[in-house]
Image: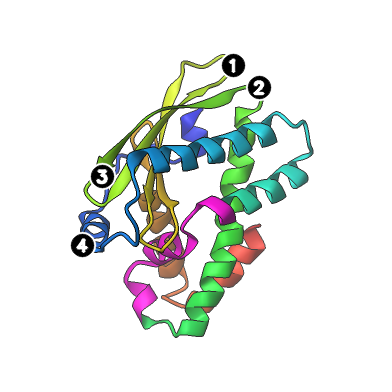
Amino acid sequence: MTKGLIDRRSFVLSSTLLAALASSSLGWAATAKDAEVLVEKLVAEINAVISSGNSESVMVRQFEEIFKSYADVPTIARYALGNDARGLSQSQMEKFIKVYSVYVSHKYGRRFREFIGGKIVVQKSRPIKSFFEVETLAHLKGWEPFTVSFLVSNRSGKLLFFNMFIEGINMLLSERTEIGAMLDKRRGDVEKVMKDLQNSI
């Protein structure tokens, strides 16, 4: 099941991203409980969508709104681009963030449909340097429960999740690998990559 959600290649969390988050000061004194409350709201909305019985197209649009509300989209998009983000103008970066936001929310929205008939339950939270980890447990019919963890920070000025792990598999690094392969195919042409992302939606 989790293989269908995220590529099962073994990843470790990028030390570069951790260092950037650790060196940045929080805009306000967030707590692990604050992060847990955020993820409880996120999970409640995900559970509501997967139990709604709506069509795939409707559910995907709902997941897109959830992603925009709860995810630190600029951070995720920049990380997915890697070093190529440095060469973009502000307008190009803003365009990529917009295109990537729709792409990634549709991508994971379709895969979260595999959770239909199940639910996600928040288990616990803990601080890690300047961000927080909130652990949840996914209960799916016919499958052993598995862990889904969210990393949460208010580095952007608002408490949002910036990464997700499913049984230890890192969403950020999976996305960087995929976008990196697309950039290689297009010889670093981000405009062409954006068109590819739009065409894949």
How far is the residue under mark 4 from the one under mark 2?
Answer: 41 Å
In the shown orientation, is residue 40 left or right of residue 45? left
Query: Does the CB distance between marks 3 and 2 fall below 8 Å?
Result: no
Number of numbered discs: 4
Report which residue position mark 4 lands on. Answer: 23
Marked residue nearer the N-terminal end (1 or 4)? 4
Q: Amino acid at mark 1?
A: Lys
**Majority secondary structure in the magenta region:** helix
Nearest to the observer: residue 31 or residue 129: 31
Q: Could you say which is closer to the camera, residue 188 or residue 145?
A: 145
Disc sitting over residue 117 in the figure: 2
Residue identifier under label 3:
12
Crowding around mark 4 (Cα neighbors within 10 Å: few <14, some 14 to 19, many 20+) is few
Instruction: Tell me which numbered mark, 4 or 2, is placed earlier along the sequence.
Output: 4
- Up/down of 2 relative to 35, above or below: above
Q: Are marks 1 and 2 in contact (CB under 8 Å)?
A: yes
Q: Using residue 113 as the reference point, say whether residue 94 is left or right of it.
A: left
Secondary structure category for the residue under label 3: loop
Of badges 3 and 2, nearer the viewer stands: 2
Q: Position of residue 154 (x, y in %)?
A: 38, 56
The image quarter containing residue 102 is: bottom right
Residue with the most extreme front position: 29
